[in-house]
Image (cartoon, grey):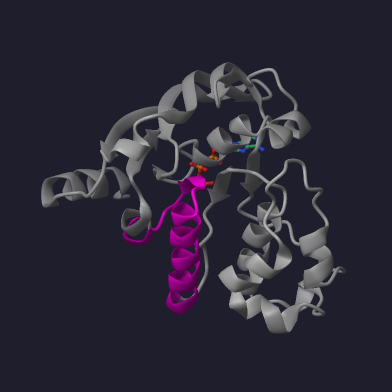
Amino acid sequence: MPEKLESALLRVEGLQAWYGESQALHGIGFEVPAGGVTTLLGRNGAGKSTTLKCIMGMARRAGSIVFDGRECIRSQPDEIARRGIAYCPEERGIFASLSVMENLLLPPVVRPGGMPVEAILELFPNLRSRMATQGTKLSGGEQQMLAIGRVLRTGARLLLLDEPTEGLAPVIVQQIGKAIGQLKAQGFTIVLVEQNFAFARQLADRHVVIEHGQVMDVLDGGLGPTEQARLEGYLRV
Ligand code: ATP
């Protein structure tokens, strides 16, 4: 691995999670190197989204989640956000009755170093002409760009992105991929949940495969044909 990726910004160990009586995660463990893209791959229901929710403090959980050297397993979501983690849920969470600008300005800046609106628009130029448009009138791709852009204002440096390409046309997927690449180049650390392996492998420094609430495999760096076949094997239905 490149030298800059050696230190872990996030370390998850023995993570368990529950929805009511039902246990969804059974001891997940992985490390997220600072300044890189880590993908969580796996079939539907494997536990990828639940893992992100646990990191953000939004599911009942036990185990250890250390971010930037500090334990967060008992922290509330607002405290976790203030430490510098931001979460873009699969459903995007755009406020339908608010304009793009209002949606962008909604989350509080919780840490110094939040991205100015102008920089967000440079990252997602499609939003520039849509600033006064209501959330309901946006395409899926525009909503996704807004969802990512919105959390950049907070000052977070670890971004948790849940299936940002889901349901989007290939040209939009490409634009989102380019933006994620730019965020990585700017020093953000990203955890990406993806079903679209072709998309994930272009961006990722580390792939974590999750099955039945457990980590099955971890692969780093540029994948050779053998590693790629191994990963595709996990994802085959
Ligand atoms: P997907 O891509 O389908 O979202 P996933 O890998 O993200 O899959 P999770 O959404 O984390 O999987 O789900 C893990 C397990 O937890 C599944 O068995 C799922 O049915 C269950 N689960 C998820 N959300 C809830 C919930 N709100 N209430 C009860 N069970 C849930």
The tally of labels here is 0
Q: Nearer the viewer, residue 178 or 15?
A: 178
Rendering coords of residue 155 (x, y %): 68, 46
Image quadrant of ligand 1? Answer: top right
Query: How far across and down, in percent of the image, does residue 39 sit?
Result: 41, 45
Task: Report if residue 175 lies within the magenta region.
Answer: yes
Expressed as whole percent of the image width and height from the top left, the position of residue 33 reads 41, 35
Left or right of 83 in this view: 200: left
- From which residue to which does the magenta span run? 170-199
Residue 51 quadrant: top right
Percent coordinates x, y for residue 82 in the rendering: 73, 35
Residue under the point 59% across and 31% down? 55
In the image, residue 94 sits, relative to residue 29, either above or below, namely: below
- Outermost residue toward the bottom in this view: 129
Q: Residue at x 81, y 60 (%)?
A: 105
Quadrant of the snapshot with the N terminus: top left
Q: Main secondary structure of the magenta part?
A: helix
User: Is residue 99 in view from this perspective?
Assistant: yes
> In screen coordinates, is 147 left or right of 26?
right
Residue 133: within the magenta? Answer: no
Q: Residue at 69% of width from left, 17% of height from top?
A: 74
Q: Residue furthest right?
A: 97
Q: Residue at x 82, y 75 (%)?
A: 134
Can residue 95 be seen at all in this image of the molecule? Answer: no
Residue 198: name its quadrant: bottom left
Q: Is residue 18 left or right of residue 218?
A: right
| Up-down relation of residue 186 to residue 172 (above or below) | above
